[in-house]
Every structure is written in structure tokens, then in C-alpha cells.
Amino acid sequence: MSIGPIAWAIPELKDEFEAATGATLTVVQVPFSEHFDNFYSDVLNGAGKYDASIAGAWWLGELVAGDYILAYDKYYNDPRFPKWDLDEVLPGPRSLLFYGGKKYMVANDHDGQVMYYRRDLLEDPRHQAAFKQKFGYALAVPKTWEQFRDVAEYFNGRDLNGDSVSDSGLTMFLKPGAQGLFHFMLLSAPFVIGPNNPKLYWFDPKTMKPLIDGPGHVRALELLVELVRFGPREMLTWDHGQSWDYFLEGRAALTFTWGDLGALAQQEGSKVKGKLGAAPIPGTHGYYNIAQRKWVKTGQPNLVGNTTGGSWAGVISKYSKAPEAAYYLLALMASKDKSQVYAARGWDGIDPGRRFHFLPPDGSGKLDTYLKAGWDEADIRDYLRAYSDNFGNPLQLPYLRIPGAYSYWQALDVHLAEAESGQLSPEAALKAAAVDFEEITLRLGRERQRRAYRASLGL
């Protein structure tokens, strides 16, 4: 598994696992950049060095297509193993645990991104009056990207943490190779995905023609480039940790990222604890229907949920010498008692996504679980409500789970950076990405990719 917070939960289980199974647990950690290659090389060569791995959801295209991992369907209801409930996982993240109708990933982390905002700033009467005078409508939690843009512009250049230094309207992490492309995915989703177009985002599943340069994607990238003006210029070279630190120092009014930030905001040193609002990713009042080749207006904001990120969860190698012991470990980590602890403490990188993580009426969780873990009550209520709404949204950004997924993403990442820095226009950047997508598809085999893509979408 990768070195970092997501790996910390497994060594904690060592004694309990070994006592229950009689097996010996050896945990191997590698840098994030080597994680996939390390495991993939092992299964590709049939070496069986690793029984299991904590995998990113985008790995499944390669791993299932190559028949390199085991489905755990036969173990799931077997009373010999720790019990965990698939039905507790909300619809968005639950879909990532299956591939081609079989169960492959054992629930663990539930990644997705939401919008974070400074509750204290948006509720300040002075800002409310000044914002309304400038923009002609009331300052509130942004529900559309247009509103998000206005709020970011308003707060940009103001002192937001009382240190007499100008701060920023927003912060993002846009360094190439540092997962900044996820910002574009989330921002573009409601410009492309809608009630009459729930799945056409990456490719045409009939032909594997890239769709990434469509009008909705282009309009979204134009907005993203505009938003860069309202954040620190340095964020073009920032990874997510640097962007999070900037927000935690109270230096930005808005951001959108994973659940980790909400938990980190509760830790010692945070200047935003008790001030942290969270809400679903903003929407649009229209989207480009790719199938109909026209823009469709929506009365209410068009909101699209997401499972963007790794959603790091366990998979079992086909070459494992002890597949039952491997499943026992992964199921133990997935059990309710363990998962509640992980989601509440937050710093382990394991984010909420199951009904028992959420408070009534959204779920069966208890407020005290979070208060004892050090959360501010208003912060945790906002945070959990945002994630419940996000994962429960029937419209979800399609997750790319096909062979070469990371290659497609790397190509997109490079060209997004060219647009964000002003080297290419948004339209030219996405056309270049589409050309790269087509080259990758041809290299891997169009028909093979088409079959994998349709299977990943459940078609």
C-alpha cells in the first residue's frame, strides 16, 4: 500500500487478525508513485508476493480485464469471516465495489469531493451588505458555479484571518501530476452530465470516440481558468497538501476537495475549526447534452454527485497463497465498529460513505461519536450532510475504470495545466487531450477498450 495516512489503519489490526486466523501479517508500504506499478508488476508476472493491496478504484480496469484479482462473492456471506454490510454503503461509492456484476473491492475509504466555505465570512453582516451592493443579490452558500465565482471574486484580496495580509477568494491544487485534474472533473460534471445524459462524459461507449473536448467541457475549463485569478498564483505549482494548509491557515474563503480537509480542520493548529461550512459541489442552470448536441436549460441548479479520488479499498490477488486470510483482514477493516472509528477520526484518510457514518435523518450515526473525536458540532453537521447529499445524488460523474485510465488522466492533466497557465486556450487544450485519448485507445486496442468501458458503466 502507499506510504501515508490511508495505510495507518492496517497495522492497528495486526494483533487481532493474527489471533483470529493464526496467520502472520506483513505490511509493505511504498511511495504513492510506485504503488500501482508495484502491485501490477507482481500480478502481471504471477509472482504472488502480495496477497492483497489497498487499491485505487481506477485500477480495476487493468486488474479485472487482466484477470489479476479475485472476486469475493463466495466469502461475503460466509459466517467464518467478519460481517460487513454492502447495503450500508451509499449508492455512489457502492458502485465502485463492483465490476461486471462481481464484487472486487472491499469497502474502506469513500472518496468524493465537496465544497468547503468559511461559514463565518458568509454570515458576516458587513460582507453580506457589501456583496449585495456589488453583485445585486444576497451572499449565501454557492449553489451554482456562477455564484461560486462571484463569492471568490468578492473575498479575493481581503484579509480573511486577521493578520493584516491580503488573502484569496479560493484555493486549489493545480500542479501537474498532483491530482489537480480532479478539480476540472468536478467543475465540468454539471456542464455535461444531466437527467437526460447521465453517462456520456469520457467516451462514446459505442465507438470509444473521446468526448472530453465537447462544448460542456470547454465551457467548464473556461470557468476554471477564470477562477485561477481569484486564488494565489502559487497554486499552479501546489499539491493538495499545500492547498489544504493555505485553507487551514484561514487564507481562503472557498475550496473544493476531499473529506480529509474537513477532518484536518478539527486538528490543533487549524484556524478554521468552528467556521467550516460544507456543501455539495455547485451546479449549473444548464448542460450540454452530447447525444442531442444541444444545450439543455434546467430550472433548479443541475447538481452532479461524484466519487472522485481513489476510494482506497482492498482487493485480493489472484496469485495469493492465502486468499481467505486476505479477505478476513479486509472484511475486518470494513466492519462497522472499525469503520466508525476511522471515519470519525478522519486523519487516517478514510472518509465516510456508509449510512452508519451519517446523522439522522440521513443515517444511523451518532453525534457523540464525532464530538468525542474532537469535531465542532456545526462543522460535522455540515460536513456529513454535504457528503450524504453528494453520494446519494442519483446523478453521478461516471468514474473512469478501464485499462489505461491513468494514462488518459495523465494526458488530460498535462493539457489542463497548459490552459490554467495561459499557454493554450481551453478549447485548444481539450482538443489536444482528445487527440491523446484517441492515441491511447488505438495503442490499447479500440475493441478491447470499448468492451471494458461498457462493462465499467454497467452497459
Image (tube, rainbow, N blue to C red):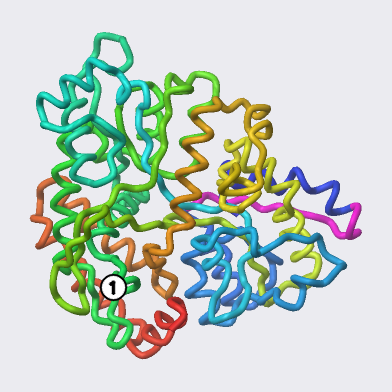
Residue 233: tell me if it is visible. no
Q: Is residue 292 above or below residue 245?
A: below
Q: Main secondary structure of the magenta part?
A: loop
Tell me: 209 left or right of 401. Answer: left
Picture residue at 29% right of the left edge, 72% below the top: 197
Amino acid at the residue labelled 1: Asn
- The reply to whether the magenta stretch includes residue 42 is no
Circle 1 sits on which residue? 196
- Residue 393 x/y as whole percent: 43, 58
Magenta-drawn segment: 19-32
Picture residue at 60% right of the left edge, 59% below the top: 89
Picture residue at 35% right of the left edge, 34% below the top: 243
- Residue 219 x/y as whole percent: 14, 57
- The reply to whether the magenta stretch includes residue 25 is yes
Q: Is residue 313 above or below residue 44?
A: above
- Residue 148 x/y as whole percent: 23, 40
Q: Is residue 199 above or below residue 122?
A: below
Among the 4 quarters of the image, the one containing residue 104: bottom right
Q: Is residue 86 above or below residue 232?
A: below
- Residue 332 x/y as whole percent: 76, 55
Give the tally of numbered discs: 1
Foreground: 282 or 405? 282
Instruction: Please identify the quadrant where the N terminus is shown.
Output: bottom right
Among the 4 quarters of the image, the one containing residue 411: bottom left
Foreground: 60 or 278? 278
